[in-house]
Amino acid sequence: MSGARPVRAEPGAVAPASPALPALRALRADDAPAYRALMLEAYASHPDAFTSTVDERAPLPLAWWAARLSGSAPAPETVWGAFDPTTGALVGAAGLRFETRPRLAHKCTLFGMFVRTAARGQGAGRQLVDALLRAAAERSGVRLVQLTVSEGNAGALALYRRCGFEPIGREPAANLCGDRWVTKLHLWHTLGVPASTYENRSPTAPAAAPPVRQRVLDAVTLPPRARASNYPPPFAERMAGREKRALGDAFGLTHFGVNLTRLAPGAASALRHAHSAQDEFVFVLQGRPTLHDDAGSTTLGPGQCIGFPAGAANAHRLHNAGTSDAWMIEIGDRTPGDCVRYPDDDLRAEWRAGAWHFVHHDGRTY
């Protein structure tokens, strides 16, 4: 629908209210000093829970810790942190380690889970686990998340079970802590697919439909996507201030995606683009973002919406030129073979084998 104009609905949509929970985000290299201090505290205060020790990790240079948080894509690890909403101090962290060998690439490992005692009971642990499950679900080819928990750590075990992990085994003498053997319980999360799917069957065989993960979801408590943008450099940096919460993925939806998107002042929803095979729909909840498309610029308000049919060639994006956050619902299907055109930038995107591949206009890869 080239030159489509927004359709006005009744105003009065309620703006999302941020809950009083610890703030979450993926850690960066400049978080290395705080992350190092947190984990050395974890190793010292709970030696039974970790394979690593203070003696092993304390002598490592800060550059080692920074490298773990570098976030280079596709990174073999990602680490998320929980921050005190008042002081901004790092109070908890947990990571995911992805496998690189082809026969193991369907699974990843949750590691290094720790929340400081003073910050417990505020939802940080559950938020961290949920954020890492989202990061795993977004990783192409990942089907399972596994972890171990020390036998007798009832609090951690209860948290993981609430988050959907199931026990699959018990390993006596997994660690030697001083003069004591530590038994580890092995758990896994199958990311919404029944565990029976993996019993004596081909991974390409038809599987049972994934169950709904949660009957009711408080949308603003869902952690944002682990990666702020899939664009290659230098385009990814232009998406600063944008957060997407993948609501549809949280329920196991596979035919279309639903995002709750927040644009901070000055942020943009995307580079100006048009899909060849996928429909798009946007509904504004709060704020007054500006639509930039082939017909010009139009300011949208709460209750207004707009759609872009596949193949319409109307390149578009939303930009928040206001002084307060803009919130919107974005819906798009997942038709295979989609190609995205970016008329203002030397970029083209192709959806192949379940992932976006970015190339220059002349076909060279990024």
Image (cartoon, rainbow, N blue to C red):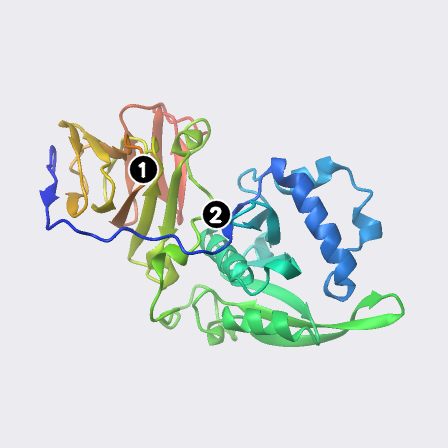
**Label 2 Cα crowd, 10 Å radius (few <14 / some 14-19 / many 20+):** many
- Label 2 vs label 1, nearer the camera: 1
Q: On the image, numbered disc 1 is attached to which residue? A: 324
Left or right of residue 88, residue 311 in this image: left
Q: Residue 107's x, y, as percent?
A: 56, 59
Q: Which quadrant of the structure image shows residue 146? A: bottom right
Observer-nearest of 88 and 211: 88
Q: Which quadrant of the structure image shows residue 345? A: top left
Residue furthest to the right: 179
Whole-angstrom CA distance, mark 2 to mark 1, is 23 Å
- Quick one: label 2 or label 1, which is nearer the N terminus? 2
- Which residue: 56% across, 70% down? 159
Q: Which quadrant of the structure image shows residue 42? A: bottom right
- Which residue: 81% across, 52% down? 54
Observer-nearest of 309 and 276: 309
Left or right of residue 154, residue 174 in this image: right
Q: Is residue 74 above or below residue 14?
A: above
Q: Is residue 265 above or below residue 118?
A: above
Instruction: Tell me the amino acid under the disc marked 1.
Output: Ser
Q: Is residue 93 above or below residue 164?
A: above
Q: Residue 318's x, y, as percent?
A: 26, 35
Give the secondary structure at mark 1: loop
- Which residue: 37% across, 53% down? 246
In this rendering, does residue 98 appear at all?
no
Q: Residue 179's x, y, as percent?
A: 89, 69
Left or right of residue 205, residue 329 in this image: left
Q: On the image, numbered disc 2 is attached to which residue? A: 226
Q: Residue 209's x, y, as percent?
A: 35, 71
Instruction: Tell me the amino acid under the disc marked 2.
Output: Ala
Observer-nearest of 196 and 145: 145
Q: Is residue 362 above or below residue 227?
A: above
